[in-house]
Amino acid sequence: MNRLARVLWALAALALVVGLGSWLYRNASLGAGPAVTLGRLYLQSALTPLLVGSAALALVFGLASGAVAALPRRRARSALKLPALPPLAAETPELAIAVRELLLVLGRQLRGMSVRAEPDIIAIMDLLMDGAIRVGASDVHIHPLEAGTRVAFRVHGVLEQVFIFPREHHSRLINRVKVLSRLPLYQLEKPQDGHFPLATQEGPADIRVSLLPTNHGEALALRIARTGVRLPQLTTLGFPEGLRERYQQLLGLPQGLILVAGATGSGKTTSLYASLGHIQQSRGELTRIATIEDPIEFDVPLFAQTQVNAEQGLTFAHGLRAVLRQDPNVIMVGEIRDSETARTAIQAGLSGHLLLSTIHANSASGVFNRLIEMGVEPFLLASATAATLSQRLARGLCPHCRTEMPLTPEEAVRLDSAGIARGTFYGPVGCERCEGSGYLGRVAFYEMLVVTPAIRDAVNAKVPSARIQEIAASEGMVPLLAAGVERARAGATTLREVFRVVGG
């Protein structure tokens, strides 16, 4: 309790003592007989205002002392005075710089709060989550190490360390999250999952909790699901203009499958949400859009969203069958993982629904054989699929310090073997704005395979993915590697980053 709060408590106690004394004195016997009755009445009438005033002062000072005692926590919750950042804006260098500055301020404040002998864990957790919401973090990772607990945010797919929390207070921080999510405090040897709601200045959110025992204590991962946020726009995702226009035409189809392929963390879900947002804008709010997700990344009021719950028997396949009975116009399935979901999705695409989903495949052409391996009949797959999209995310070059760099022998060989022309490319240098790393934000690049009669015949014949890729390239598809090289040629990223994320 701070000094001002103690003074106010003392004043409240003094007022209470005065009031109690006046009440006792007022009601004490002053003697008997008519001679003292007039004096007693006069004394009682004089002490009445003192009694009432003392009680009122005691109440006011008591409430004020309680409010002052709570001020440190309130200041901690609102200590981050920087303006909120748009978490779904385009990943521009300017946004990346603002996020870094905000993370530095947040880290300094949290370190100052955590070095105290008895840190306020509630205030630290409140400020930590408020900062995560403001910078648009998708996850908060609290990982115990031998020397301390590392706290990091995943911002735009990249982990950014915020600060190191003292090791001796790690269990208190974990217990705070367990209390919020109503998980047992004594359970230390088994993984636990839960969630809790969070109200912030940026709006409400649902926090998914995952606890995992490690050799240094329980590791904590918090997934942030925002409520009522604005959907991402296709124009901010880095689609080349011609590709974006063609993709928007496909989103206007009344039925069929559009499948997005890519590795974990390549932005597939963001692309799906942006696609649903475009469909809603172009078709109107009366268009019925339903989703089956695990987890629900963004709570969108106009969508009918269903959370997968395998423990209760609600899988992607069961959820999709139930959604089909609701007869929506557009369906989004978070991921096609098994044969049952794949076959149900194909039937949905053939029966008058536009279905969007993600799938783990190396390329747009590799989606077909991946589904065939799951047991989908090739002729059904070829008939139901409208297009496949493959995407990658690479680190973006800092525009303030990037410089032209010559090709390395390995890069030259890679370009020549792919039949891509050489040219001028850029590399990282490092400056204050990028903290010496040479990189800021991320850039995306895409390849889109539209199912034409030639592609349909190839899928029916179960030809290898490489052959489907050749047919699509001959019909105008820009391969993923070539799309990435064009972004590197424009100075948005490096050739090394393109080769790293494309692989092969």
Image (tube, helix red, strand yellow):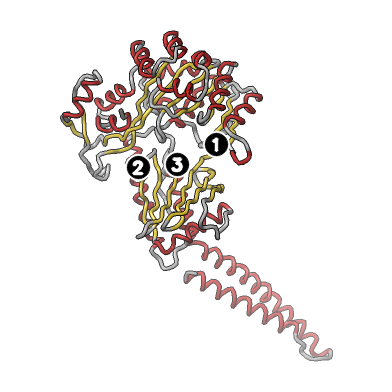
Dot 1: what SS?
A: strand
Secondary structure under tag 2 reads: helix
Q: Position of residue 140 (x, y in %)?
A: 44, 47
Q: Secondary structure at mark 3?
A: loop
Residue visible at 76% across and 89% down in the picture: 30
**Mark 3 crowd level (few <14, some 14–19, many ≥20, 10 Å Cα):** many
Give residue 428's position: percent from left, percent from top. 22, 37
Mark 2 is surrounded, within 10 Å at the Cα level, by few (under 14), some (14 to 19) or many (20 or more) other residues, namely some
Q: What whole-number distance in Å separates the C-alpha atoms at marks 3 and 2?
A: 17 Å
Q: Horizontal placement of 217 versus 424: left or right?
A: right
Label disc, if present, on residue 253 of the rendered structure = none
Q: Earlier in the sequence, mark 2 or mark 1?
A: 2
Asked whether 461 or 34 is in front, the reply is 461
Disc 2 residue type (three-letter): Ala
Distance of label 2 from label 1 (alpha carbons): 26 Å
Residue 299 is labelled as 1
Front in this rendered view, residue 75 or 430: 430
Q: Give the mark nearer the N terminus: 3 vs 2.
A: 2
- Quick check: marks 1 and 3 in contact, CB under 8 Å? no
Q: Label for residue 98?
A: 2
